[in-house]
Every structure is written in structure tokens, then in C-alpha cells.
Image: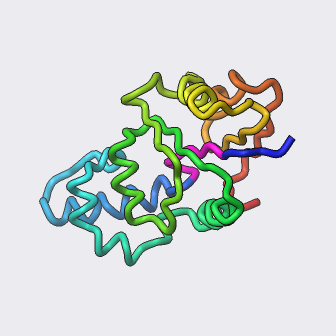
Amino acid sequence: MKFKAVLWDWLGTLVSYKDYSKFFCNKIEAKYNQKIDYLNLNSQQIIYFKEELENHKELFIPASWKLVNQLHLLKIDQFIISNGESADIKKKLEYSPNNCFKEVLGSEMFDPKPSAMMINCIINKYEFKKEELIFIGDSTTDKIAAKKCWRRVFWDERPIWKR
């Protein structure tokens, strides 16, 4: 059976944990002269640094985005399922190399991973069969969520850019 859709995790899979967050953390802390939670940047802070983001595309993991682009050309549906908030991800996607995602689901709408709720929502809403989906993630919670939906899960511990 041919696969019809790819589910992507966000942080650590499509964007770099350290580079992405620390880059903005340093810029914002310098601007406001205060310490911030660099893993929870809000949309206002992202908009403020739009120019810096556009000049630092490497914050988006190149190997992942190459695959996103190839799948888009093949007309494969793509979704993001994340423990982050969907509104913040959508705002950051405005500056991504290619925003071709059909839907972004975040943990403000569903139980966070390792719950399989977001995966099952996509299966039910778009009437996919489980065999028609591929889930690409980087964390143990992604792996557990996948195992709740599929009997066999291939898991490569190496970062995507080292494969």
C-alpha cells in the first residue's frame, strides 16, 4: 500500500532545539535586557526578529526541509503534530523554507504526546488508514505515540542530518 501522508514532529525534527531557541533567546535578551524562557518564545517576539530569522534559515533543519519539499512535489499530505502550541508554530512557519502543511495540531487542543490523540485525530478527520501514514519524530514521546498506533515502528536514534 502506498503512503498518503506524513506526520512531522516540530521541535528537534523540523527545527533545531539549540540553534533555533538560543538564537532568539540571545537577540531578545539583548533587546529587553532580561532573561527569558527560550523554549517558549511568543509570536510577538518572533515577528520582532523576522529579519534575523530570514537571514538564518539554517535554524530550520535542512535535511528535514529537503524531504518536506520532495514530499510536497509528490503531492503527499503533510501535517505537524507537536507538544508545542499550534498558533506559535503557525507563526514560525511563515518564515520557514516552505510552508506546505495541511494542518498543525498542538497540545493546547489535544493531550500531548505520548498520547496518540493527535495522530488518531488526523486518521479520523482525513479518513486515512494507519498503513497510509508515516510519522517522523525525534523523541521518546514521539516513539511511544507511534507505538500506540502502529504495531511495528522503525526508530533510528541518529539525528536526521546524520543519516
The quarter of the image holding the C terminus is bottom right
Question: Does residue 92 sit above or below 107 in this rendering?
Answer: below
The residue furthest right is 1
Where does residue 88 sit, x and y in percent of width and height? 34, 47
User: Can residue 141 be seen by looking at this rendering?
Assistant: no
Image side of residue 133 versus residue 18, left or right:
right
Q: Residue drawn 26% across and 49% down?
A: 42
Q: Residue drawn 72% across and 45% down?
A: 4
Choose top left, top right, bottom left or bottom right for residue 135.
Answer: top right
Question: Does residue 51 sit above or below 136 in this rendering?
Answer: below
**Could you say which is closer to the camera, residue 73 or residue 40?**
73
Where does residue 122 sit, x and y in percent of width and height? 58, 32
Where does residue 81 sit, x and y in percent of width and height? 52, 39
Question: Does residue 96 sit above or below 38 in this rendering?
Answer: below
The quarter of the image holding the N terminus is top right
Image side of residue 35 versus residue 80, left or right:
left
The residue furthest left is 32
The prevailing secondary structure element of the residues shown in magenta is loop
Query: Residue 74 magenta-drawn?
Result: no
Query: Residue 11 magenta-drawn?
Result: yes
Q: How are the residues colored?
A: rainbow
Segment colored magenta: 6-13
User: Can residue 155 be seen by looking at this rendering?
Assistant: yes
Where does residue 108 sit, x and y in percent of width and height? 37, 29
Q: Residue drawn 37% across and 39% down?
A: 85
Question: Does residue 66 sit above or below 112 in this rendering?
Answer: below
